[in-house]
Amino acid sequence: MPVLFEIVTQERLVYSAKVDMVVVDGLDGRLGILPNHSQLLTGLKVSELLVRIGKAEEVFAVSGGVLDVRPDRVLVLADTAEHSDEIDLVRADEARKRAEKFLETNWRMAESTADARLDVLESLRRAGVRLRVGRQRRGALGVRSLEGTG
């Protein structure tokens, strides 16, 4: 029996459906959530989120947030979340390149604070996840416009 699953950001309801399984990276590792899972509340890493309904799969890029598992529903309150179809591969690749360039030129400079470096590393992680998720979908559709970059 499927469970109601929702992904919500501050801006919108990203996804809502009855699902058979949710797979996502929590702060302590990869989690597979099935219907009737025990209650759980955990933070989320920047990661891919996979939803299974029967044999069909939906893939999302999420950047942080909270996973709330209850007997009757599973809720992701995400900082940001995008379905694979929504990801602009060109923008994600440009973000990755900007972060890599910053790290190459500023990593050891005194004005590059530890906080700034952490922010850039987080941006690099987000861009990498967005690219992977977007490419997975487009690869399945036979579109490989940015394949081989990064």
Image (cartoon, rainbow, N blue to C red):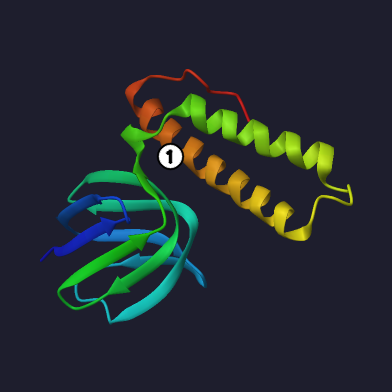
**Relative height, residue 38 to residue 148 (above, below):** below
**Relative height, residue 109 to residue 132 (above, below):** below
Q: Which image quadrant: the C terminus? A: top right
**Relative height, residue 35 to residue 62 (above, below):** below
Tell me if mark 1 has few (under 14), some (14-19) or many (20+) residues whose alpha carbon lies within 10 angstroms of its own.
many
Quarter assignment of residue 136: top left
For this rendering, which residue is in front, 65 or 111? Answer: 111
Quarter assignment of residue 56: top left
Q: For the residue marked with disc 1, what is the amino acid? A: Val
**Residue 141, x across and y down, in percent:** 33, 24
**Relative height, residue 34 to residue 79 (above, below):** below
> Is 88 positioned to the left or the right of 105 in the image?
left
Residue highlighted by disc 1: 133
Outermost residue toward the front? Answer: 111
**Residue 4, x across and y down, in percent:** 15, 63
Residue at disc 1, secondary structure: helix
**Residue 21, x across and y down, in percent:** 26, 60
> Is 70 positioned to the left or the right of 128 in the image?
left
For this rendering, which residue is in front, 65 or 115? Answer: 115
> Which residue appears at 18% of the width and 54% of the height?
16
**Residue 81, x across and y down, in percent:** 37, 49
For this rendering, which residue is in front, 57 or 66? Answer: 66
> Is 2 positioned to the left or the right of 131 in the image?
left
